[in-house]
Amino acid sequence: NIPANAKWTENGVTVAGGNGEGGATNQLQYPFGLFVDDDQTVFIADTGNNRIIQWKNGNTTNGQVVAGSGNGLHQLDQPTDVVIDKETDSLIICDDKRVVRWSRRSGTTQGEVLIDNITCSGLAMDEQRYLYVSDAGKDEVRRYKFGEKIGTLIAGGNGAGAGLNQLSTPIFLFVDRQQNVYVSDNNNHRIMKWNKGAKEGIVVAGGLG
């Protein structure tokens, strides 16, 4: 919880990368989504390098690649987001037209496809371990139980558009404790909030052109 009177410093601190664009372990190339674990380890979807790389708290020198490149089960192809499933100690990765699970246990050499045929762009997980996935191709957000392939429509799904029941290339997601979903509605230049069970969203930021 963030206090109402919280203040941030004006200047940020580099915690990963900062050594120019590239594929070395001290560099990033077009990083997209990220996840911060309880121990402040940062997991980054390093999209341009086709990998997930972690940077441990306090180590700003080099990251460690934890899932690697290409489109086979042992590879990734321009991943865009990542979350951690603590129950299975695994990474859930938004990859090229699929969602894959990649165990964090040592010796893991390939991932497991959870959902396919989806233009996955963003991920979130709630406290009940429901997985939320934004589909930029279908302009919608769906919620999945692990093992499901179809999921439940949560937001959008009415074609690309700017109506309150529509999205246009949704990207990143956040789910609060009440299972309300916040969506970065990319092509509409707005942030939408969809209350649990709602048929329409609420514009909470942007959307003015």
Image (cartoon, rainbow, N blue to C red):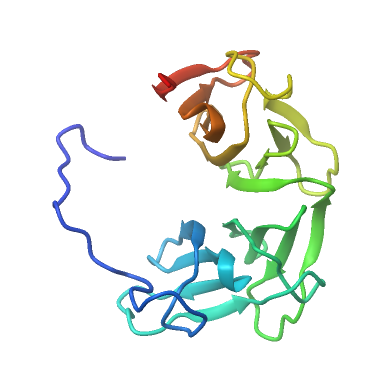
Q: Which residue is situated farthest in the front direction here?
A: 209
Q: Is residue 181 left or right of residue 121?
A: left
Name the residue rendered at 74%, 46% in the picture.
119
Residue 149 percent coordinates (x, y): 85, 43
Name the residue rendered at 84%, 37% in the picture.
150
Q: Is residue 105 left or right of residue 178?
A: right
Image quarter where the C terminus lies is: top left
Name the residue rendered at 65%, 65% in the picture.
90
Image quarter where the N terminus lies is: top left
Relative to residue 138, is residue 193 depicted above or below?
above
Could you say which is closer to the camera, residue 113 or residue 22?
Answer: 22
Instruction: Give residue 130's quadrant in the image.
Output: top right
Q: Is residue 18 left or right of residue 136?
A: left
Could you say which is closer to the camera, residue 57 or residue 116?
Answer: 116
Relative to residue 78, is residue 156 depicted above or below?
above
For the image, the number of numbered tags is 0
Residue 183 percent coordinates (x, y): 53, 33
Name the residue rendered at 59%, 45% in the picture.
125
Instruction: Give residue 173's quadrant in the image.
Output: top right
Q: Is residue 43 left or right of residue 132?
A: left
Relative to residue 13, is residue 170 depicted above or below?
above
Residue 172 percent coordinates (x, y): 54, 42
